[in-house]
Amino acid sequence: MTQGLTMRDDFPQKTKETLARRVGLRCSNPKCRRLTSGPHATSGKSVNVGVAAHVTAASLGGPRYDASLNAKERMSVNNGIWLCQTCAKLVDSDSVKFTKEVLLNWKETAEHLAASEIHRQDAAAVCAEDAHSICFAVDYWRMWRNRGNLPGDSVVVIEGWARGDVRYSGRIRLRNDLPQEDVLHHLRMEFQRGDEVLFSDEYPFPDGDVVLPPGKWVTLEVCYGLHDFSIFEKAKTVWFRAETVGDNDTHRWQVATIDHASVRMPE
């Protein structure tokens, strides 16, 4: 390597194409959403004004550089975001404002918007059932037994008991399709058997109200635990419940069906 030359971990062409297509060739900045590809004046050609930008820099000294990543990780889809050329320049000019967390949130939102546009008939049907046009999605859901004081455990782990007998983790997504802002409060995770609510818990949501801007996805990270193993044994489904500020209309969405056999002690 020539002295003074900085090695860059640039994206392969396939990775660039994947990043672009996952957001429908639109800029991932939610305040921009510019289409980045279109026809060229010459027949058979196209114009591209999009950039596969690095969330954390491709080389030492770059914006948001993360020394813990190896070259393969820096060049992966997970470390990329599709932006127009203007927004790509903007985020690299102010890495204090446009942090890794901000860019990853843009990316997730853009991908969800692209998915909803592809399946917009289904999404509209789901939203039409809700007077407030709030769309709901679950990115992932996992439950596992915690080490502690469950039946059959040979050792009682006080720290484990404090976190709950059964742990759960998930990512909930909400989008408000009204032209004005909406706000949710009294958030709950509920465990249910048939129509019976066995347990309703507010503590997984310590931040209080959730503001839903018009047309944007909002992410709620949930990680908490059940302290009564008998509730887990009886419950068949998990639900998310919230009320709309102002009119106190109640909204409920099913998060998951509980597969008791798959909920095991971690290795």
Image (spheres, grey):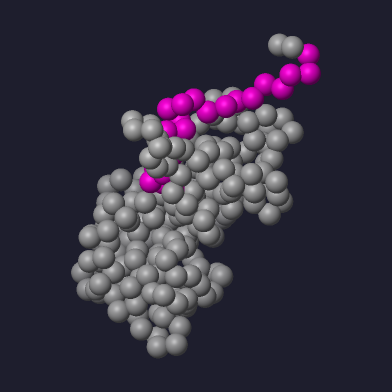
Which residue is the extreme one toward the top?
1
150, above or below 208, in the image:
above
Q: Tell me which residue sits at (30%, 79%) in the image.
A: 131
Which residue is the extreme one toward the right?
4
Please tell me which residue lies in front, 159 or 176.
176
Which residue is the extreme one toward the bottom?
247
Please tell me which residue lies in front, 49 or 130.
49
Residue 204: x and y in percent read 49, 66
Q: Is residue 87 visible?
A: yes
User: Is residue 151 toward the left or the right of residue 1 in the image?
Assistant: left
Residue 171: x and y in percent read 43, 56
173, above or below 199, in the image:
above
Q: Is residue 21 magenta?
A: yes
Magenta range is 3-26
Residue 184: x and y in percent read 45, 76
**Splitting the image into 4 quarters, where does residue 237 fall?**
bottom left
Q: Tell me which residue sits at (55%, 69%) in the image.
A: 206
261, above or below 74, in the image:
below
Quarter of the figure with the C terminus: top left
198, above or below 95, in the image:
below
Q: Tell me which residue sits at (71%, 11%) in the image.
A: 1
